[in-house]
């Protein structure tokens, strides 16, 4: 088999890449280890920067998202028993965010690719990439028990943090920068109307909690826990009780509960691999970098890599230019590091750690500053709605 761009992984990065390349007349094949059902139902984050939502609309896959997504103009920071609203739109010249589940984006992209005759092979096994230093790299895999090979011009490693692309780069090429945060998030999806119209980021002496939503009937809630805790230690009653305590206000705010549809614990990590390229293998999304979920940036950062890579491939195929491909990693990493900084800052400001009382006081001062200084609130808002894109 042959294609122009061989894509490993059908997450948001791989699917969006395949879709945008198709619109530029560039062929790709997507190889995915999991089933279509698994990809379409895996619950992840759900906040799209306006730029990400605009990109999906402009490329023709925003129909259902525009109908079902919830446009938000602000977020709430809750601490000291009180709410402090950050008016994202007012601080950023009218920009907004869209609350729409990542797996819904994945469903929309899979449907668009298959409708357009795109090739996505689900349930493939033993994916291995090779000949990365040549102009004809290849991907070997098994499909239905049969050994196959895909020859391509370029390989896009969109296979997430645990994928095989990044580890296929020879030792010594990549520098890894990472930080494991000393806490995790326990997340639930609940059949309960969200108790707030806007997201609430709560900093409490017992730890961080977040109220988000997926629809007017479904809430998505998170609470900070220990990384080593098992989900079995958290029966539903205990989760609701802990959420109620952390969301408590002086005004007697009440959380709405309901049946828990799904729950899980996610570790929090900050990670960057640099450069995001070796030979004809390019890394995109979680394969190259992970941010803690506090800033809701994972999917948005993956989409930003895709934009840069599509422009670079377009310049290559349309005009024989290699300069944008050569500059791919540097262009992506400028944004990646700014988003790492923002995600780390939101995380440390809002969570309680064992660092000690001194740091708890600093984090409270930070929250006080962000909610009382227009300059500080603007800095949060412009990052939250998404930093602008540099011209190609
Ligand atoms: N072969 C083929 N596919 C693989 C392999 C492999 N060896 N290893 C992993 N995959 C697939 C996974 O099953 C998954 O579907 O690659 C895909 C990677 O998708 P994601 O982990 O979603 O990563 P990405 O597309 O970069 O999305 C960015 O945004 O909200 C964040 O972390 C969140 O997923 C998220 C991300
Ligand atoms: C979510 O809705 O899943 C969500 C929202 C905001 C975050 C992280 C996750 O910061």
Image (cartoon, helix red, strand yellow):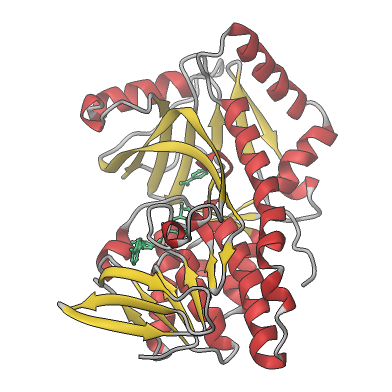
Q: Is residue 64 visible?
A: no
Q: Residue at x 64, y 8 (%)?
A: 358
Q: Quadrant of ligand 1?
A: bottom left
* Residue 295, placed above or below residue 210: below
Q: Pick the quarter of the image with the C terminus.
A: bottom right
Q: Residue at x 44, y 89 (%)?
A: 3
Q: Pick the quarter of the image with the N terminus.
A: bottom left
* Residue 311, placed above or below residue 77: below
Please give the count of numbered marks on the rendered protein. Answer: 0
Q: Residue at x 53, y 74 (%)?
A: 133
Of residues 369 and 267, which is closer to you in this image? 267
Of residues 241 and 250, which is closer to you in this image? 241
Q: Residue at x 71, y 62 (%)?
A: 331
Q: Position of residue 383 (x, y in %)?
A: 71, 46
Q: Position of residue 74 (x, y in %)?
A: 66, 44
In the image as oriented, which residue stretches furthest toward the left?
A: 145
């Amino acid at each position: 088999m042959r294609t122009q761009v061989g894509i490993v992984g059908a997450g948001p990065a791989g699917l969006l890449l395949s879709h945008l390349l198709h619109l530029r007349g560039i062929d790709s094949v997507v190889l995915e280890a999991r089933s279509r059902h698994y990809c379409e139902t895996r619950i992840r984050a759900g906040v799209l920067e306006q730029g990400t939502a605009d990109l999906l609309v402009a490329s023709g896959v925003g129909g259902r998202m525009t109908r079902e997504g919830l446009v938000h103009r602000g977020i709430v920071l809750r601490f000291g028993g009180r709410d402090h609203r950050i008016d994202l739109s007012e601080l950023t010249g009218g920009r907004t965010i869209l609350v729409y589940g990542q797996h819904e984006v994945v469903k929309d992209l899979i449907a668009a690719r298959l409708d357009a005759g795109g090739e996505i092979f689900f349930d493939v096994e033993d994916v291995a990439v090779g000949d990365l230093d040549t102009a004809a790299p290849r991907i070997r895999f098994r499909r239905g028990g049969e050994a196959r090979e895909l020859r391509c011009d370029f390989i896009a490693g969109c296979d997430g943090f645990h994928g095989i692309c990044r580890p296929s780069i020879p030792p010594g090429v990549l520098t890894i920068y990472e930080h494991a945060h000393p806490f995790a998030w326990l997340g639930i999806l609940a059949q309960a109307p969200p108790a707030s119209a806007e997201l609430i980021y709560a900093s409490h002496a017992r730890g961080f909690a977040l109220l988000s939503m997926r629809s007017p009937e479904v809430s998505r809630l998170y609470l900070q826990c220990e990384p080593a805790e098992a989900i079995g230690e958290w029966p539903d009653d205990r989760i609701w009780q802990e959420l109620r305590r952390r969301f408590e206000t002086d005004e007697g705010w009440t959380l709405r509960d309901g049946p828990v549809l799904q729950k899980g614990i996610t570790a929090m990590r900050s990670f960057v691999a640099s450069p995001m390229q070796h030979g004809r293998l390019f890394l995109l999304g979680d394969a190259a970098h992970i941010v803690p979920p506090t800033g809701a940036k994972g999917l948005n950062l993956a989409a930003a890599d895709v934009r840069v890579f599509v422009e670079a491939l377009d310049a290559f195929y349309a005009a024989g230019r290699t300069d944008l491909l050569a500059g791919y990693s540097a262009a992506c990493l400028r944004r990646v590091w700014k988003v790492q900084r923002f995600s780390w800052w939101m995380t440390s400001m809002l969570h309680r750690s064992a660092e000690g009382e001194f740091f708890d006081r600093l984090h409270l001062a930070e929250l006080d500053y962000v909610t009382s200084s227009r300059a500080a609130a603007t800095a949060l808002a412009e990052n939250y709605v998404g930093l602008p894109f540099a011209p190609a």
